[in-house]
């Protein structure tokens, strides 16, 4: 039923059914922008590169699978985030897995909600974003053969020998801390306002850039689509032959992990943002949330994958993550391609950092009360700095682990409450078909 009403979800997004007097903090478009600010980010750029590098082309197919399943998952979690909103210690309405666990399943399930919130404190840190943004600055701008770039690299490398950290990474971490602090301490309204303006811009720039690369290799599109599908059941290019299930099992694992990281369906983060939407109709928020995996994984991740495949960057074993994508953009659009990517990466990373801070403060709010939630932002900005100077392997393992811990309580509660969502869905579309509601 959600898939068949995809068009209605777009109508809701455009404001056709906007209710300014409904409970909540932000409108449907701002809720979608806030979650896209988090999901349309480094998972679409370096996440796809990591999947290709270690899993091969077939991993992209399994990212598609997570998107199709994720559309349904997000429909349920985002509907529940409105259906079972709770109140924090200040009496303000809140939404998210921790609240619909307690409100929907009862107080005896509160340990499950606490488990989610504890995992969310670490899982919602922006270490991956700051790490990859720092990496592309270091590997591109600071690696420039010009005098300034060369001298900077000498300075950075000399610092490594004495302390174990790059001076350039420390500088970048400090800059990011300052920029993000200016927005996140303003709360969800400021985050939603900034995200609703930056997200459309970043998506437009990135898509236009990747489309240009694809058009220049348009005759190769059928071949690489075929390669993605055939390799999905072979795993010929996977690098984890010794992993559980052999190369095929490793490739499927990589595709699902990177897909889940990209669109965050079922993790629970999306429900926290959509729980703040101004609406009295839970189903509408579910339909809006369902649009995200389609935009994020089916569209943007696929385009990134094609660019990496067509330019041959994915076969370069000397680079990984964001650096692989930088190689593809430099090859696909000489001279300016790299700089366009840097602009996109900067906006992608920054907007993700804005939204993740909101997720973490909601988790701390649930655990220790509204009057203490602001303390999370201090830990949050420290994690930005920590991510900037830490290795990519350490960051990926930590965030993947915490996302898995968040998914467990989210999906247990969602499956148990699924009949309530289906009942509300049938009621909503019955009223819609009979014209029982106008705009609201």
Image (tube, rainbow, N blue to C red):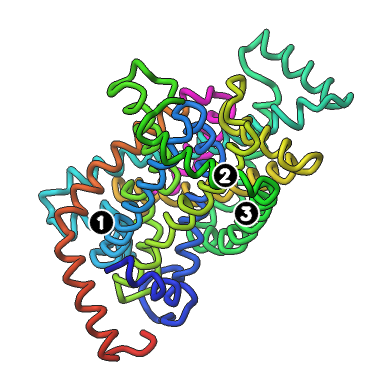
Of all residues, the one furthest to the left in this rendering is 108
Which residue is under mark 2? 304
Of all residues, the one furthest to the top in this rendering is 161
Q: In the rendered structure, does residue 381 fall within the stretch colored magenta?
A: yes
Mark 3 residue element: helix
The quarter of the picture where residue 421 lies is bottom left
Magenta segment, which residues? 373-394
Q: Is residue 231 above or below residue 226?
A: above
Label 2 and label 1: CA atoms lie apart by 36 Å
Q: Main secondary structure of the magenta part?
A: helix
Q: Residues within 10 Å of mark 2 (few under 14, many from 20)?
A: many
Label 3 and label 2: CA atoms lie apart by 9 Å
Q: Is residue 259 above or below residue 190?
A: above
Q: Quadrant of the N terminus?
A: bottom left
Q: Quadrant of the C terminus?
A: bottom left
Residue at x 56% of width, y 41% of height: 45
Total numbered labels: 3
Q: Residues within 10 Å of mark 1 (few under 14, many from 20)?
A: many
Mark 2 residue element: helix
Among numbered discs 1 and 3, the one appearing first in the sequence: 1
The spot of residue 231 in percent (x, y) is: 42, 34
Is residue 399 or residue 264 the one in the foreground? Answer: 264
Q: Is residue 63 above or below residue 26?
A: above
Q: Give the left or right position of residue 339, taking residue 233 as reference.
A: right
The quarter of the picture where residue 7 lies is bottom left
Is residue 49 or residue 407 the one in the foreground? Answer: 49
Which residue is under mark 3? 207
Which residue is under mark 1? 99
């Amino acid at each position: 039923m959600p898939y068949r009403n995809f068009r209605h979800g777009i109508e809701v997004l455009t404001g056709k059914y906007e209710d300014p007097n409904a409970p909540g903090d932000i409108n449907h478009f701002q809720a979608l922008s806030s979650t896209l600010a988090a999901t349309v980010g480094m998972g679409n750029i370096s996440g796809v590169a990591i999947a290709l590098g270690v899993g091969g082309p077939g991993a992209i197919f399994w990212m598609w699978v997570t998107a199709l399943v994720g559309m349904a998952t997000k429909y349920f979690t985002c509907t529940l985030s409105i259906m079972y909103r709770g109140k924090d210690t200040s009496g303000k309405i809140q939404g998210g897995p921790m609240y619909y666990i307690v409100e929907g399943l009862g107080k005896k399930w509160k340990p499950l909600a606490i488990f989610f919130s504890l995992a969310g404190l670490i899982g919602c840190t922006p270490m991956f974003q700051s790490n990859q943004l720092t990496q592309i600055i270091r590997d591109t701008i600071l690696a420039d053969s010009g005098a300034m770039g060369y001298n900077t690299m000498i300075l950075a490398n000399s610092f490594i020998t004495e302390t174990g950290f790059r001076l350039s990474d420390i500088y970048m971490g400090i800059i990011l801390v300052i920029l993000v602090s200016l927005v996140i301490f303003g709360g969800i309204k400021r985050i939603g306002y900034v995200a609703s303006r930056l997200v459309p811009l970043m998506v437009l720039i990135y898509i236009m850039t990747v489309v240009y690369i694809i058009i220049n290799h348009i005759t190769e599109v059928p071949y690489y689509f075929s390669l993605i599908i055939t390799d999905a059941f072979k795993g010929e290019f996977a690098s984890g032959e010794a992993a559980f299930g052999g190369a095929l099992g490793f490739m499927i694992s990589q595709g699902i992990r990177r897909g889940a990281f990209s669109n965050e369906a079922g993790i629970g983060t999306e429900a926290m943002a959509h729980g703040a939407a101004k609406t009295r109709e839970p189903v509408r928020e579910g339909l809006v949330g369902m649009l995200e995996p389609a935009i994020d994984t089916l569209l943007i991740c696929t385009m990134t994958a094609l660019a990496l495949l067509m330019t041959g960057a994915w076969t370069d074993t000397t680079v990984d993550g964001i650096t692989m994508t930088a190689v593809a953009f430099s090859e696909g659009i000489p001279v300016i391609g790299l700089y366009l990517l840097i602009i996109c990466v900067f906006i992608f990373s920054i907007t993700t950092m804005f939204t993740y801070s909101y997720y973490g403060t909601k988790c701390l709010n649930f655990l220790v009360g509204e009057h203490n939630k602001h303390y999370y932002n201090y830990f949050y900005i420290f994690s930005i700095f920590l991510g900037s100077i830490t290795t990519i392997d350490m960051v990926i393992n930590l965030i993947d682990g915490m996302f898995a811990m968040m998914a467990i309580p989210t999906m247990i509660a969602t499956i148990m409450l699924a009949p309530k969502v289906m009942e509300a869905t049938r009621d909503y579309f019955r009223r819609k078909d009979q014209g029982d509601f106008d705009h609201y």
